Image (spheres, grey):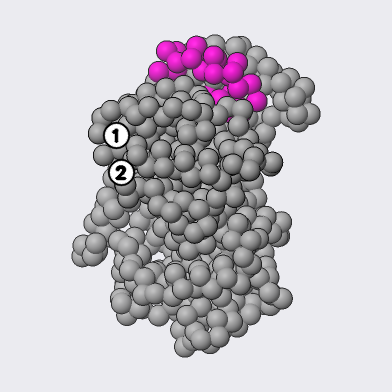
Amino acid sequence: MIEIRILGPIELIVDGEVMPLGGHKLRALLALLVLDSNHVVSTDRLLDSLWGENPPRTAQTSLQNLVSQLRKLLASDRLETKTPGYRLRVDPSEVDAERFRALVADARAMPAAERARTLRDALSMWRGAPLADFAFESFAQSDIAGLDELRLAAVEDRIDSELELGLHAEIAGDIERLVSEHPLRERLRAQLMLALYRSGRQGAALSSYQDARRALVEELGIDPGPALQRLHASIVRQDAGLDPATAAPSSEDHFQAVMNAMLAGRLVPVLGADVAELATSLAQRFDYPSTNGAGPLTRVAQYIAVMRGSGPLYDELHALLDVDATPTQVHRFFAALPPVLRAHGAPHQLIVTTSYDVALETALVEAGEEFDVVAYLATGRDRGRFCHLAPDGTVRLIDIPNTYVDLSLERRTVILKLHGQVDRSADREWESFVVTEDDYIDYLAQADVASVVPVALAAKLRRSHFLFLGYTMADWNLRVVLNRLWGDQPLSYRSWAVQPHSFGLEREFWRRRDVDVYELPLPDYVDALTAHAGLVEVAQ
């Protein structure tokens, strides 16, 4: 059993014993291989990283000797010779950085106390600066920066959880120290301002904002970002929303309010999509060069589009999505609602989703319900418009939204797919995906989405309560969606966001939209909605 530690000076531990790594180049070779573990690292790259642009004539032989030494320290099958170089085979659990990353990811779904404890345990794994042996080696700089950022983000997550627990007075000094080390980091500034304000130090909180503004202007020539400016304005106004969270509203009141809006035909569910598995599959298929896991889908897709072309990206997305998607409990709940709505004389649902797959459609088909799909077109001559897929399979471009009347919620459910869709027909004419970073930039630059959807749906979007399921404000993609639908204004009707746990900054984002956060795992939430809707238990 081996363990490789890079959260500090590099260490190799075999069967519980720290192995002597000897000279700098042997340690550097191990670092290069573990940073790209389970992928082939070319001999040319190793030579260039270890000896620079002009390696000595003996460099090739020296590299082979280093590989031989490393093989003696590792199990014989760990370090493979694989054209055009070498591959180190390790399980992620055998590298401290990957264990740290996994703990941080797991912590996000935990209650505040458990989250804080888990993050503290994760941060205790650090033994100093990451890859400390290679602080001045060019090959390690991007990885060192990435690991430093990962650690600092985990510290900020821990601070958020401690603020949720009401520890503002206890941690204010710790945040001040971190701010002095990272004066341009606005999330830390916001946490410090919030901790000071909640500790009864409003003046100090406002002074901290002015310090942030001076630092940003002097160093970067910019003012604080909108989030920090809004927090400053809230502190000046002494907004009640800045106070620590109090007891949650009555569950009965919440679910009754949601059901009342639903049965009145005034509720629009907005369904998020878990794209982590999609990002991982694309990263593996196209050998995405990351030492920090697959990364966000937008970044992976952007890399593929630039390096391989949008055609191969779309083809692979189609292959991954052109399957019989299994509906989740959330999908089955909304697929079971049409008979309830008809029985109450309510119109059918407009369901907004950012998913690319057909899981929701599958749930409706299985429930015997007809539906229309209105999907965004991200590419081609009709980019920025929507198309309408009718139940009979015909598809029409929605060319003039204000006169398009072939959709009615009196007849059947309408699915509004804001990020495009997979087209499972042979010609794939209406398939497109908002998936790369450039796609999102284009999306943000378009006129508001509500102006390019059919007139009946636009009216529904303007005059409804919203129920956000599966979203977190930490996901900037959601903020793009909200800006395309409603600009930067609060929502006109009371709305709700459901997520297992929310952090301080997320709650502030939602509050500024006048959206109430309801903290409950989605399966439990759907169970409760199912009971209030009078449905037979929805299949898991």
Could you tell whether 53 is left or right of 153 in the image?
right
Image quadrant where one finds the N terminus: top left
Dot in front, 2 or 1: 2
Taking the magenta stretch, the answer to whether it contains residue 180 is yes
Residue 12 visible (yes or no):
yes
Could you tell whether 528 is left or right of 158 in the image?
left
Q: Earlier in the sequence, mark 2 or mark 1?
A: 1
Question: Residue 511 got which mark?
Answer: none
Which residue position is annotated with label 1? 14
Dot 1 crowding, Cα within 10 Å, few <14, some 14–19, many 20+: some
Asked whether 376 or 114 is in front, the reply is 114
Residue 102 visible (yes or no):
no
Q: Is residue 208 above or below residue 36?
A: above
Could you tell whether 156 is left or right of 304 in the image?
left
Q: Is residue 503 above or below residue 196?
A: below
Boundaries of the magenta span: 167-191
Contact check, label 2 and label 1, Cβ < 8 Å: yes
Disc 1, SS = strand
Which residue position is annotated with label 2? 75
Considering every residue shown, the one lying at the far left of the view is 536
Identity, as a three-letter code, of the amino acid under mark 2: Ala
Q: CA distance from mark 2 to mark 1?
A: 9 Å
Magenta segment's dominant SS is: helix
Disc 2, SS = loop
Residue 168 horizontal/vertical position (percent): 44, 17
Q: Which residue: 58% across, 38% down?
A: 50
